[in-house]
Image: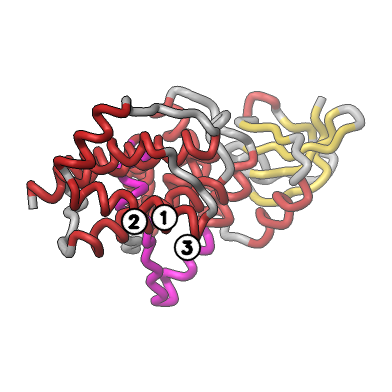
Amino acid sequence: MLKIKKILNNNAVIVMDKAEEKIAIGAGVGFEKGKNDILNPQKIEKLFILKENEKLQQLLQRIPEEHFILAEKIIAYAEKQLDTKVNDHIYLVLSDHLSFAIDRHKQGMVVKNKLLHEIKVLYPKEFDIGLWAVNYINEKLAIHLPVDEAASIALHIHTMKIQGGDLKDTIRQTSILKSMVDSIQDFLGIPISESDLSYERLIIHLRFALTRAETESSDSMDEEMQAMIKRKFKHSYRCAMKVSDELSKVHGIELPDGELGYIAIHIERIKNQS
């Protein structure tokens, strides 16, 4: 038997479940209810027993109710599209993020996501969910959140998947990838089109190269092939070396020599297509 201890809003209440305090979420769970009323379990969509209970209570009392409902809908859509459950912590972080983004937008503050193109390539499913979420929010609130917000939502969803990773680590890796691509563009003196398939292949390979370097696993190219690429694609190989040197100096990440040959091949393809 769940007894209501406190009404947070029409869709969220604090209940006592035996001797444990929990937050019950569900459409209309708090509507026309009062303290000590018994809650119908069938109305509950989510029951939180989180360390963040206090933070979630504060958030639910601070942000507009509709912002939390929007986050709920987006999370449900994401779980369906990805066919997986996400960490309950996302209810806290995504609701807070969306409410801040919506308020910021209404105040005329436009924030660009510098990692938009990289996120779009690295996390395509999550980015599609982000696009759906932006369209859904814009339709419901009659506003015009930019596509950059889809990338931010995608990162939150990715890191809240089971074993999805840490948000700071994900942003750090994506930022490093952007700096590597920028370095290649500067060296070649040509822009790399984000819509080009070669750009997508480059980004994906660089991500795996970073992961292998940080986990100290290797995908080494044999010495004969390495020497051939170094000889045949001199300019592209020098570019790969420059990227590797900057990665080492700025981020302390050492790429094995075997990776340089693969990166040079991708650079050569981009150079030829330009």
Q: Is residue 166 magenta?
A: no
Specify the segment rendered in magenta.
99-124
- Label 3: how many Cα within 10 Å (few below 14, some 14–19, many 20+): some
Whether residue 115 can be seen here? yes
- Label 2: how many Cα within 10 Å (few below 14, some 14–19, many 20+): some
Cα distance in 3D space between marks 1 and 3: 37 Å
Circle nearer the N terminus (1, 3): 3
Q: Which residue is mark 2?
A: 242
Which residue corresponds to the image point at 41% horizontal and 75% vertical from the top-left?
A: 109
Cα distance in 3D space between marks 2 and 1: 5 Å
Q: Nearer the viewer, mark 2 or mark 3?
A: 2
Q: Residue 231: which quarter of the image?
A: top left
Mark 2, secondary structure of its residue? helix
Quarter the N terminus occupies: top right
Q: Is residue 165 left or right of residue 255?
A: right
- Answer yes or no: do the residues labelled 2 and 1 have beta carbons within 8 Å? yes
Q: Which residue is mark 1?
A: 245
Amino acid type for the residue under numbered disc 1: Asp
| Residue 101 numbered mark, or none | 3
Mark 3, secondary structure of its residue? helix
Which residue corresponds to the image point at 25% horizontal and 47% vertical from the top-left?
A: 237
Q: Is residue 104 left or right of residue 264?
A: right
Q: Position of residue 28 (x, y in %)?
A: 60, 40
Whether residue 70 can be seen here? no
Amino acid type for the residue under numbered disc 3: Ala
Q: Is residue 107 magenta?
A: yes
Q: Position of residue 126 (x, y in %)?
A: 39, 39
| Residue 158 numbered mark, or none | none
- Answer yes or no: do the residues labelled 2 and 3 have beta carbons within 8 Å? no
